[in-house]
Structure formats: structure tokens, C-alpha cells
Amino acid sequence: MKTGVLLLTHGTVDGIGDLPAFLTNIRRGHAPPESLVTEITHRYEAIGGKSPLNDTTARLASKVSTALGLSARFAARLWRPTVDDQLRALAEEGCTRVVLMPLAQFSSPIYADHAKARAAEVGLGHLEFVVVPNWGTDDRLHDAFVRRARAAVADLGDAARETRLLVTAHSLPVMVVRAGDPYEREFRAAAERFVAAVGSQVGSSRVVFQSQGQSSGPGGRPMEWLGPDLPAAIAEAKAEGVKHLLVAPIGFLADHVEILYDLDIEAKAWAAEAGMGLSRTASLNDDDDMVQTVAGLVKRALA
């Protein structure tokens, strides 16, 4: 039996011209309003016109392939390269078993179920799938984030004593959590462990949810998102006399718009307006410890 690995991402475009179609996919076939396209275009332009995520994930797949001695590819749930095409490519290479490795450590079932459904839809139901389950509390992942946080704290020097650590993840509609999704619970568990490892090196710590989506849902009904959000956390820090903010986005794995714009540009500007500095911990991207984390999780799934 030949085994392949498929790394699964949310997806991003390689060119701004594809944003309307990409946003339509995100909105489940509903075309985005022009105001949304304009705003997202602005964000991509502000980070250089392109997210590095696809290139980073392609390098990660190549390194994981080398580490495991298995064919490894990556696919995007909502864009290209598609799950359909990458599963076909693995099948054409002779793979009859595929490890589904979601690069969304608190949302694995969503990505794995999508890949399985696509396989059945395009005639690849004969493939055997092995799924890496939620891995947000994995020891290797934890250690990788802690190393980067300690390095960022060291860079602050004496200012660390007056710094508040903001541990962030992407927000999620509250109704999803109330329906039973473990996302918030698992992220808070990972954040608590992370703060226990590095929190004593800074003045204080908070858990924050960033990059909230639209405030209205189906039918125009108000949509509540997990919080507190970054503006609220920054306002609280200002009121309490905090001098500097260090953001540790441990809900994310690689640099993308949510990091390069939402934190490095937007949140930094909000902090400056409040009279504070803001820095962040480095992302894992395709660094060696990220490669070893992914390879180790695939090995464990196969065992």
C-alpha cells in the first residue's frame, strides 16, 4: 500500500484579481458586496499584493515529503490548488492511502470531512483516508510557540515587565460554539498552557479573538463573534496603563493576511493611537520545528 500526505489549508489567492471569486467561495456561492471586495483588496495591497501562504505551504509540503519519505502535497479547501486535483495527483502516483493533515489545529474535522466528500464526488472513493485529529494541544506545537514567545520577550529587554501578552486566535461565530464545536474550549486550553510557560516573563496576559467577520449573518440577522476582540483588548490595556503589547497568535501557523495586515498593520496602528507599542511572536511557517511537528503527527496517525 502506497501512502501519500495531503496538507489542507483554508486557502488564499495568488492574485488580487481572483478575490471576488475567492470571496464568493467563502460566502458559499453568494457574491460579495463591492465594499467587501474593496476592503479585502486594500488588505492584500497593503501586504504587497499577495499572501505568502501558498508559497509557504508548498515549501512545507516538500519538506514534510522529504522528512517522511512519502509523497506530500497541499490543497486549499476554498481555492486552488483544489482538493480534487491534489487527490487525483496522489492517486495517479499510485497512492491508495492518504493522510489528511489539516493545517488548522483546532478545526481538523471540517477540513477532513470536506476532503472525504470531494473524493467521493469525483470518483476517488476507493482511497483510504487516515485523519490527523485536532492537534492544537500537541507538545511539539506548544514547544514551537513557546520558543518564539521567549525570543520575542528577550527582544523587549526591561520593557517586558510593562508588557501585556495577548494570546490570539481567529474568532468564530458564537452560534457555532453553542452548537458544540470544541474550537473555543481547545484554544483556551492551549492558551492557558502557553501562558503558564511564558506569562511570568511579562507583566500580564489576556486571551483575545482577532479577525472577526461580518456583523450580520443569514437574513441580515446580527452575528455575535467570540471575544474580546483586539480593539477591546487594546482599550483595556490603555486604561490600565500598559506600555507595550506582545501578540502571540498561537491560533495561526503561518504568515497570512490575518497576521501581516490584521496584526502588523491594523493592530499596530490601533496600539499607536492608544500610546502603546505592539510587537508579535514569529509564525511557524515552514521552519524546521514546524516540519518536524507535522511529520510527527502524520507518523502518529499512521501508527
Image (spheres, rainbow, N blue to C red):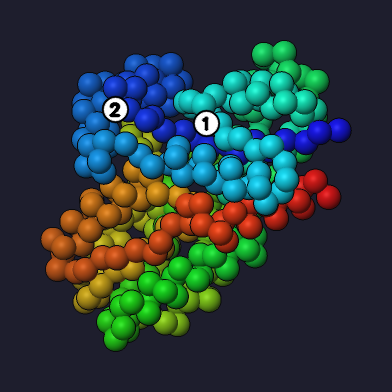
What residue do we see at 32% from left, 36% from top?
50
Where residue 119 sits, quadrant-wise, is top right
Q: Quick check: marks 1 and 2 in contact, CB under 8 Å?
A: no
Residue 36 picture location, percent across and down: 26, 28
User: Does 150 sit above or below residue 43?
Assistant: below
Secondary structure of the residue carrying numbered label 1: strand
Left or right of 45? Residue 202 is right
Residue 282, position as x, y percentages in the image: 40, 61
* Residue at 52 percent of width and 44 percent of height: 59
Q: Of helix, strand and loop, which one carries label 2?
A: helix
Whether residue 256 is situated above or below residue 219 in the rendered picture: below
Viewer-side residue, 109 vs 94: 94
The label on residue 16 is 2
Residue 94 % position (x, y): 77, 25
Up-down relation of residue 93 to residue 176 (above or below)? above
Q: x, y percentage for residue 92?
A: 71, 21
Residue lying at 56% horizontally and 31% vertically, measured from the top left: 75
Quarter assignment of residue 53: top left
Residue found 44% across the figure and 40% down from its top = 55
Q: Is residue 8 visible?
A: yes
N-term-proximal mark, 1 vs 2:
2
Mark 2: few, some, or many residues within 10 Å (few <14, many ≥20)?
A: some
User: In the orientation shown, which residue stands out farthest toward the bottom?
Assistant: 158
Q: Amino acid at mark 1?
A: Ala
| Residue 222 visible, this angle | no
Q: Which residue is mark 1?
A: 76
Q: Could you say which is closer to the camera, residue 46 or residue 111?
A: 46
Real-space Cα separation, disc 1 to disc 2, in angstroms: 17 Å
